[in-house]
Image (cartoon, rainbow, N blue to C red):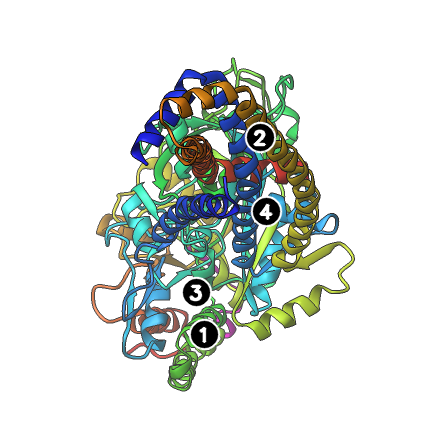
Amino acid sequence: MRDSLYLAWQYLRHNRAKTLLLVLSLAVFIGLPLVMRAMSEVMQESLMARAESTPLLLGKKGSSLDLVIEALYFQPKGVEPLSEADVTEIDATGLARGIPLRTGLMAHGFPLVGTSLDYFPFRHLALADGRSLTMMGECVLGADVAASLGLGPGDALLTSPSTLFDLAGVYPLKLHIVGTLRPTYGPDDRAVFVDIRTAWVAEGLGHGHQDLSQAGPDVVLARKDGGVTANAKLVQYNEITQDNLDNFHFHGEPSTYPVSAVIAVPDNPKAGTLLRGRFVDDPTRQLLRPAGVVEGLNQQIFRFERILQIVVWTVGLATAVMFVLVMVLSWRLRAEELRTMTRLGCSRWKAGQIMGAEVVLMIGASVALAALLGFLMAQYGETALQNLILRGS
Amino acid sequence: MTPASRSIALTVALVLLAVATGCSKKDQKEQRTPESTPDTHDALLVYTVNYPLAYFAQRLAPAGVEVVFPAPPDIDPAFWKPAADEIGAYQRADLILLNGAGYAGWTRYATLPRSRIVVTAEGCREAFIDVEDTSKHQHGPGGEHAHGGTAFTTWLDFRVAACQAARTRDALKKRLPAAAGEIEKRYEALENDLLDLDTRLRDVAKTWKGQPLLASHPVYQYMADAYGLQIASLHLEPDQPLDSDALKQLDAVLAEHPAKLMLWEDAPLQSTADEIRKRGVAPLIFAPTSQPPATGDFLRAMQQNVTRLECATGAQECL
């Protein structure tokens, strides 16, 4: 048997191009449906796990899928915001506690998520390095963000301007990194977390500037009735530090500040049902169960996957037929070679064994390649596929 | 290639794939295990931002509750700025009692777990009292605005204090449902003590009949509002002598507001007391007790405050 394998190996080595072509074709034929199925299952499980761990989600009336995708997976969908008063309302029911989420801003290409400290234990997010948020202006990085940017506690990160060409728009805010999170293999790894008030400052609802009561005439245009009008020279702070904290302030009624969505964590299932009942007829807001929404998305993915599977199996069948054809034609072309082998004393059985060994080696290489492809996709493909589906949905 | 060998090869591929994806899921489960969460201790840990709230919590809490008021003793807790590790200690508490009305400005920028925060004065009044701030300014498109403040010594209106104690009671009952009966009983006793002080101050107000009062510091707004006291406030420190500016300010206020009594947060310097006595004004200590008193407790300090006021106004005989 070893002789047969040796001769088969030498033959395949000699005909490298043909062998490589056949191995690649077979690897795709074997690997693609398996990889597709495995990836789809992993991704659906991951989407569902995230949704199931989020009992209830409050948002503005509109697309429930957009709301879930923005609040759970931090993919900006431009959902209409609620207000801080809605978070207070959830808390005041005594049925659930509300965890606010402010999304939509970015920092170095990663989503900036403004939330409360309750979010971290709720998602079982543990610190890998540094400490938790303690004041405005600080941020904690998800594992992927920290690894991609090579940043950690003690470093700083700038928020991305909301509009590139808006010269009168909001200045980027320098965030002080105080901690990095352990990987969770989910959307939290690719987010930058800040206190929700920091998010409001980053989007221009709050700001800090030099003390106007001590500003010089080069900054002050007019002082009238206790009021001070400053010109554009007024120094606005682009970072929040211990020294300038007191100069940061918000304008307007705090209860009206925007909140993209509120995760409602009911005290028990009965409280959850009662809470849902309260929002059934709400004309402007929806309280939904994210698992239900993601189930609908998964069903759509499953339908699409079935169509794709038919295509893949058809292509696979064509590949198999081609492989058989190539092998049969190859054996015919090699009839003279086989006759020579017989004349040299090789039995027909031995010749068949050599041909069989060639096929086994090629299929073996294809399976190994398909497995490698599967491994790589399982390691790195889930996130890419998830992003593709969530962005496109 | 026989069908049997093909199926073996496919099985191998499936196993390899399962191992590959399985490894990833296993890692995921191991990493998801949370670190020790803030509330993994036996005793219920309560943090407060001032001494009155710590006193209420101590009076109401059954055994097994640890009440912590961490501000250093030489600092007014309203203006204390805790460091990151001190904020971290608040974050680890099971219950964080805030005063509300803008008290403890650091809570405005600190990150605290909102599910464990109780703002005790919230809803205890229709509206909090605004402190006039004239530093209005304008810049950019936002229009004119001022960073006005809010009076925050809410507990000097003893009905508000009782309401703050009730909020503390509710928070403790929610976290310790098994001790709800005991907490309620303790609250009734505390409420009686606070409402007794309230009644005594109302009697003082009736006797005093709206005569003007002075205050060394603007901390008595809620007391004045609740009991109908006409209090004009200055910005004088009990441990600092009065300079000429302070005396001018005092004279100017007295010209418009001819008070016979002046409330002080603490005993003023002898020289200060002499200066104000020269002007026909008697100094009177009414300590807001935002820090623990040297002796006794919040209730004892407040009873002494009210007794001094009763004596000075003639509402009760001096002991």
Place of residue A380 in the rendered image (x, y in percent of width and height, measured from the top left): 46, 35
- Distance from label 2 to label 4 (Cα)? 49 Å
Residue A245 appears anywhere in the view: no
Crowding at mark 3 (Cα within 10 Å: few <14, some 14-19, many 20+): many
Crowding at mark 2 (Cα within 10 Å: few <14, some 14-19, many 20+): some
Q: Which residue is drawn at 37% across and 51% down?
A: B26
Residue indicated by mark 1: B174
Question: Chain letter of disc 3?
Answer: B
- Residue A71 disc label: 4
Residue indicated by mark 3: B155
| Magenta highlight on residue B206 | yes
Q: What residue type is labelled 4?
A: Ala
Under tag 2, what secondary structure? helix
Q: How many labels does the image show?
A: 4
Quadrant location of the C terminus of chain A? top right
- Distance from label 4 to label 3 (Cα)? 40 Å
Establish whether labels 4 and 3 are both on one chain. no
Establish whether labels 1 and 3 are both on one chain. yes
- Distance from label 4 to label 1 (Cα)? 29 Å
- Of marks 4 and 1, the one in the foreground: 4
Image side of residue B37 versus residue A162, left or right: left
Q: What stretch is highlighted in magenta?
A: B205-214
In the image, B300 versus A146, the foreground residue is A146
In the image, A167 versus A67, the foreground residue is A67
Place of residue A241 in the rendered image (x, y in percent of width and height, measured from the top left): 38, 32
- Distance from label 1 to label 3 (Cα)? 23 Å
Taking A341 as reference, is B242 above or below it?
Answer: below
Residue indicated by mark 2: A323
Taking A282 as reference, is A362 above or below it?
Answer: above
State which quadrant residue B249 falls in.
Answer: top left
In the image, A121 versus A163, the foreground residue is A121
- Distance from label 3 to label 2 (Cα)? 88 Å
